[in-house]
């Protein structure tokens, strides 16, 4: 009974949330400012890969055992499958990928509004400054509009490379973060 839960999806989302918040708090505290888009994205992906590895390793060595309530079973409980846990993790990751995307882009919009008001005051003095500033802001925005898609792609690359890289998961993680998906989100 101590290993039983009502809902594997809720448990997984709660665990994902706790780990994600802890990582972001550590980043913020260590640098003294809010996380960048790259840091948030990397943190989200890192929580996913850590939880994925924990699930896969636990089932591979037989130490992972979670039970859920199931009214269709005679005793009312059944063991959760690896696929169910991975599916719950994928769902949590999809949700938090959307959260990161929305946070980064909504925060960026708020910054743009504040910057635009300040810029307007300056631009009243210099009309050419308006055109230059507007073009720079547009170029900056192009790289962050697809965070959710990038994070989902990172998860797929992780899944594809997991079984062939189990002895060097940190290298797989860095390769995905550095070379393929998350880089270029510095804002």
Image (cartoon, grey):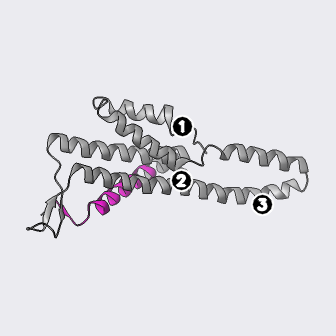
Q: CA distance from mark 3 to mark 2?
A: 24 Å
Q: Which residue is mark 3?
A: 117
Residue drawn at point x = 71 percent, y = 60 percent: 113
Mark sitting earlier along the chain (1/3): 3
Decide whether residue 53 is among the magenta residues. no
Occupied quadrant, residue 157: top left
Question: Is 10 on the left-hand or right-hand side of 64?
Answer: right
Picture coordinates of residue 21, whole percent (x, y): 41, 55
Real-space CA distance between mark 1 and mark 3, rounded to the nearest whole angstrom:
30 Å
Asked whether the viewer can see residue 2, the reply is no
State yes or no: discs 1 and 3 in contact (Cβ < 8 Å). no
Question: Which residue in the protein does label 2 denote?
Answer: 101
Describe the element under mark 2 as helix, strand or loop: helix
Give the extent of the magenta segment: 2-24
The first of marks 3 and 2 along the sequence is 2
Residue closest to the eye, 13 or 74? 74
**Label 1 sits on residue:** 183
């Amino acid at each position: 009974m101590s290993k039983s839960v009502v809902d594997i999806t809720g448990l997984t989302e709660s665990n994902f949330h706790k780990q994600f918040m802890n990582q972001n708090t550590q980043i913020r505290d260590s640098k003294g400012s809010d996380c960048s888009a790259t840091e948030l994205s990397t943190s989200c992906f890192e929580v996913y890969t850590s939880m994925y590895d924990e699930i896969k390793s636990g089932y591979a060595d037989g130490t992972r055992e979670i039970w859920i309530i199931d009214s269709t079973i005679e005793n009312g409980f059944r063991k959760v499958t690896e696929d169910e846990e991975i599916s719950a993790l994928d769902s949590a990751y999809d949700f938090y990928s959307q959260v990161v995307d929305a946070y980064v882009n909504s925060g960026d919009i708020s910054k743009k509004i504040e910057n635009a008001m300040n810029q307007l005051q300056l631009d009243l003095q210099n009309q050419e400054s308006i055109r230059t500033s507007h073009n720079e802001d547009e170029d900056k925005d192009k790289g962050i509009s697809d965070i959710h898609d990038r994070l989902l792609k990172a998860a797929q690359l992780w899944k594809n490379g997991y079984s062939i890289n189990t002895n060097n998961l940190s290298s797989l993680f860095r390769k995905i973060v550095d070379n393929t998906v998350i880089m270029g989100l510095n804002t």
